[in-house]
Amino acid sequence: MAHPIKHFITITKHRHKVIANCARAGILWQGLRHDLSKYSPTEFIPGARFFQGTRSPNEREREIYGCSLAWMHHKGRNRHHYEYWNDYNPKTKQIENVEMPVRYVIEMFCDRVAASKIYNGKDYKDSDPYTYFLRIKGKNRMHPNTEELLDKLLVMLRDEGEEKTFAYIKTECHGRKISGERE
């Protein structure tokens, strides 16, 4: 059964939490553009169809069809997902993880915190985003430098809370460049 209104409310609440987090992290403009593709028919229709309210509808779509077309559309348009940052390396002739620009790692952090709050509701703990991250940590799913920075931010959130983590992001992460990052 499709739930377009519940899905719309959920993705909009999530977006608003990400916008607030991005503002706290000093990247408000990125927050305002965050996840706009979720409102496109390619993502919204499956999202409404597979809506459950306690996890991403993409998970249910994968269970039924073996893949999520909505997710493939989404990750290809949203740079805050590490899956966006995979490319063919002409030297090794392999698809490899590319290091994410810091501003997108920060947005990914903001996104994970917001998603954990939406899906865990009143049971949310600052350790939840880190627990979710542990499913992929160390499995060569993202560039090692990207994983290291995300891990650092999520551990800081878990151990020291939001206020200190967002203050750290604003003072220590802005202006930080990665190897080969373009302006």
Image (cartoon, helix red, strand yellow):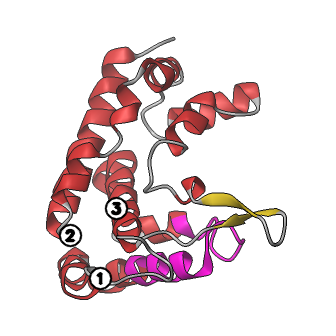
The nearer-to-camera label among 2 and 1 is 1
Q: Are marks 1 and 3 in contact (CB under 8 Å)?
A: no
Q: Which mark is residue 25?
A: 2
Q: Which mark is residue 107?
A: 3
Q: Which residue lies at the image location 37% right of the left edge and 66% below the top edge?
A: 109
> Does the stretch in magenta take in 141?
yes
In which image quadrant can residue 127 be found? bottom left
Q: CA distance from mark 2 to mark 3?
A: 8 Å
> What type is the residue that disc 2 sits on?
Ala
> What type is the residue that disc 3 sits on?
Glu
> What type is the residue that disc 1 sits on?
Cys
The x, y position of residue 89, in whole percent, is: 74, 66
Residue range (magenta): 133-154
Q: CA distance from mark 2 to mark 1?
A: 9 Å
Task: Please name whichever residue, 172 or 64, is drawn nearer the observer in this view of the structure.
Answer: 172
Q: Which residue is mark 1?
A: 173
Q: Are marks 2 and 1 in contact (CB under 8 Å)?
A: yes
Q: Secondary structure at mark 3?
A: helix
